[in-house]
Amino acid sequence: MDHTGRVRSLLLHPVTLVCLYGFFLGAPGRGTIPYAGGARSTEAARARPDVLDATQIQWTTWRDSIGQFQIGYPRRWHLIQARPRRDQRSYRAGEILIAGEVAKVTIREPEGPLWPGEFTVRVLPNPNRLSLDEWFTDFNLSDLWEHQPSDTTLGTYRARTLVRWMYDQTQREYVLVVDDRVYHVFFAEHNSNDPDFPRHQAIYQQILQRFRPDQP
């Protein structure tokens, strides 16, 4: 049998036909996400319809007496309140306070999705009651994606926002000054590794709208 005949025989073999059928049935664009773990993440979201649609989420509110703010977040997500380091064990960055932080909370999606969502609020001291412009002169502006930070508002407060490179994603940040406190809020601006990113982005915006510093 020549080469062409062998190829034709292989393609018509029953086992080959079954494999090809399975390949095209499960090909990207037919209900699965075209990389490892994506299909499992989609199935997990379908099993939890309340988290698939960001507009259908049940919310709860956290009141931080140390950081002097409140924030709403999805009831199913975890809120991690950072504590001072008391030993030399390994911790996630959101679990401990680093130098200069008065308070920090990280709101994180439960483990299970391929790439869990995460939203962080840091509170820094401002003992000299510097204005936003004055305080920003010493703020770390490395790895900016945008050329310059831009002015905006967060709630009723004047704020400054920027986007910077952070490892495998870009990160959206907001900074605002309220009396003797500085709030540094951040979350993913874009993450091509996260198959649920559009949903996460919608949730981040809703969390941001529920962030309220205490009045001075």
Image (cartoon, rainbow, N blue to C red):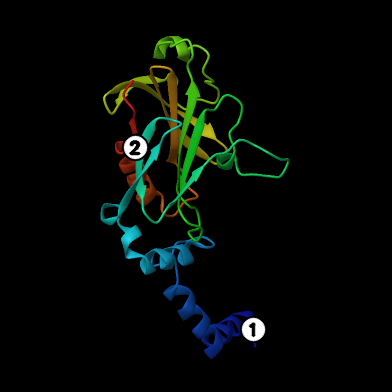
Left or right of 21 on screen, residue 157: left
Most extreme residue toward the right is 88
Q: Residue at x 34, y 41 (%)?
A: 207
- Kind of residue at disc 2: Leu
> Which residue position is annotated with label 2?
208
> Which residue position is annotated with label 1?
2
Mark yes or no: residue 13 visible: no
Percent from the top left, x then y, of residue 146? 44, 25
Q: Toward the viewer: 184 or 172?
A: 184
Percent from the top left, x then y, of residue 65? 42, 34
Q: Secondary structure at mark 1?
A: loop
- The first of marks 1 and 2 along the sequence is 1
Instruction: Characterize the local packing of mark 1: few (<14), some (14-19) or many (20 or more) Cα atoms within 10 angstroms.
Output: few
- Kind of residue at disc 1: Asp
Q: Which label sits on residue 21?
A: none
Most extreme residue toward the front is 65
Q: Secondary structure at mark 2?
A: helix
Q: Residue at x 54, y 27 (%)?
A: 101
- CA distance for labels 1 and 2: 67 Å
Q: Residue at x 61, y 26 (%)?
A: 99
Mark yes or no: residue 174 visible: yes
Percent from the top left, x then y, of residue 206? 31, 43
**CB atoms of marks 1 and 2 within 8 Å:** no
